[in-house]
Amino acid sequence: MEFTSTRNNSLSVSSAQAILQGLSEEGGLFVPRQFPQVDLAEACRLDYCRLARLVLEGFLSDYDPAFLGQAAEQVYGANFGGKAGQLSKVTEDVYSLELWHGPTCAFKDYALQLMPRLLVKAKEMLGRTETTLILVATSGDTGKAALEGYRDIPGIAIKVFY
């Protein structure tokens, strides 16, 4: 899948390049050129790890599907105590999606546990070896979730401004 910039639709980059670069040269956001089609009935039958893999494979087509499956399992399996995307029944017709089962009890764990793995793999795929600095500004749980997600990740340094 190719990604383009919101400020320059003639630009086209791979998902690995979009992840590594973050923003396009002119400051635009990278967005997919098209959206993958998913069989909704099939997707609804999947557990969270398999659903995450299905979605990731659709958008990150330059990544090895085995890597995406392993990353989804590592992140949303053990790190979430097997409760990623857990629905809890409130009443007969009402359910609550619990987004607090990650390592820091913040919904941001869903992205900040996966993104470090995708970033390191993107650097590997593109032959980049420099240290990547992650800057985070927070007044709440974003900093804690980012620190936990990028902890002990090779080739990554993180600074959090509170």
Image (cartoon, rainbow, N blue to C red):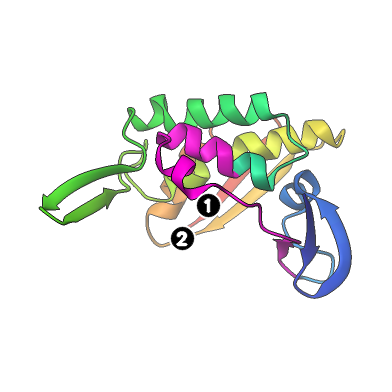
Q: Which residue is mark 2?
A: 138
Residue 160 is marked as: 1
Q: x, y (%) of residue 44?
A: 41, 43
> Is residue 143 among the parts visible in the rendering?
yes
Question: Which range is magenta?
Answer: 28-55
Q: Disc 1 on helix, strand or loop?
A: strand
Q: Position of residue 59 (x, y in %)?
A: 67, 48
- Residue 129 seen by the camera: no
The amino acid sitting under disc 2 is Thr
Task: Pick the residue in front: 42 or 160.
Answer: 42
Query: Within the image, what quadrant is residue 152 found in?
Result: top right
Disc 1 crowd, CA 10 A, few/some/many (<14, 14-19, 20+): some
Give the residue drawn at x 74%, y 41%: 61
The disc placed on residue 102 is: none
User: Element under label 2?
Assistant: loop
Kindly check if marks 1 and 2 are in contact, taking CB atoms under 8 A apart as contact: yes
| Residue occupying image coordinates x 67% and y 29% | 65
Q: Is residue 141 left or right of residue 17?
A: left
Does residue 40 show up magenta in the picture? yes
Whether 162 is among the magenta residues is: no
Up/down of 148 relative to 89, above or below: above
Q: Residue at x 46, y 51 (%)?
A: 143
Q: Residue at x 82, y 33 (%)?
A: 125
Q: Quadrant of the C terminus?
A: bottom left
